[in-house]
Amino acid sequence: MCIFFLQSRLESNNIDPDILTALHKLWKNNVPSKVGVFGWRLLLDKLPTRANLASKGILSSPHDLPCVFCFQVAEDCNHLFFSCNKVTELWRQVCLWLGCDYNLQEVGCKHFLSFGLIIKSKKGKKVRHLIWLATTWCLWRTRNNILFRGDKADFSALLDQIRFISWLWFSGRAGRKA
Ligand SMILES: [Zn+2]
């Protein structure tokens, strides 16, 4: 995919400068291509969340709309990845692992950019957005496994998965096409 072509198209379409900054930082991470595309879609709110499917008329029943993690709020991108109670607890654990304070109230690209700022250590700076991608990628996989495989919402092993995937990507063992 020609990222620079997409980026220049977005620039000419008057996209929020914060989103453009986030997208620019996103592509600097050494992650598999499909994860880069996933991050791109997330930041632009183009993932097939329940709210997005409903807005296109693909989902119409109110029973299809709740978040599969908490079943209390309609699943849109910001709730699913940033503000669901289950998810904020996971971000707190990720921050604890990285030795920084959790204080992320923002959503979407602002969450992405703030996450980059809270990591102070030199070592952390190299991988901050890679870990952000690993966390959101694991959440999306967990959500899909609940919806399409009938798995239970189990967050207990997610931090270990995020650590493992981050290491895999950072060490280049996953390859760009994995
Ligand atoms: Zn929820």
Image (cartoon, helix red, strand yellow):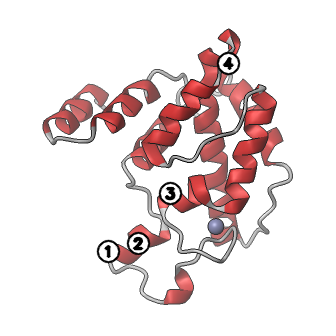
Q: What amino acid does circle 2 point to?
A: Leu
Residue 11 % position (x, y):
19, 34
Check disc 1 and report its element: helix, strand or loop. loop
The residues tagged by marks 1 and 2 sit, at their Cα atoms, a distance apart of: 5 Å
Q: What amino acid does circle 4 point to?
A: Gly
Q: Nearer the viewer, residue 122 or 152?
A: 122
Q: Residues within 10 Å of mark 4 (few under 14, many from 20)?
A: some
Considering only order in the chain, which callout, 3 or 2, is on the residue closer to the N terminus? 2
Evaluate if marks 1 and 4 touch, with contact meaning CB atoms under 8 Å apart.
no
Residue located 84% across and 49% down the image: 157
Evaluate if marks 1 and 2 touch, with contact meaning CB atoms under 8 Å apart.
yes
Residue located 52% across and 41% down the image: 111
The residues tagged by marks 2 and 4 sit, at their Cα atoms, a distance apart of: 36 Å
Q: Quadrant of residue 118?
A: top right
Left/right of residue 127 with respect to residue 99 in the rendered view: left
In this view, the residue farthest toward the left is 12
The residue that disc 4 covers is 124
Q: What amino acid does circle 3 point to?
A: Asn
Residue 93 % position (x, y):
79, 42
Left/right of residue 58 with respect to residue 85 in the rendered view: left
Q: Which mark is residue 56?
A: 1
Q: Residues within 10 Å of mark 3 (few under 14, many from 20)?
A: some
Considering only order in the chain, which callout, 4 or 2, is on the residue closer to the N terminus? 2
Check disc 3 and report its element: helix, strand or loop. helix
The residue that disc 3 covers is 78
Considering only order in the chain, which callout, 4 or 3, is on the residue closer to the N terminus? 3
Q: Nearer the viewer, residue 53 or 172?
A: 53
Left/right of residue 6 with respect to residue 76 in the rendered view: left
Q: Is residue 175 visible?
A: no
Foreground tag (1 vs 4): 4
Relative to 111, residue 21 above or below: above
The residue that disc 2 covers is 53
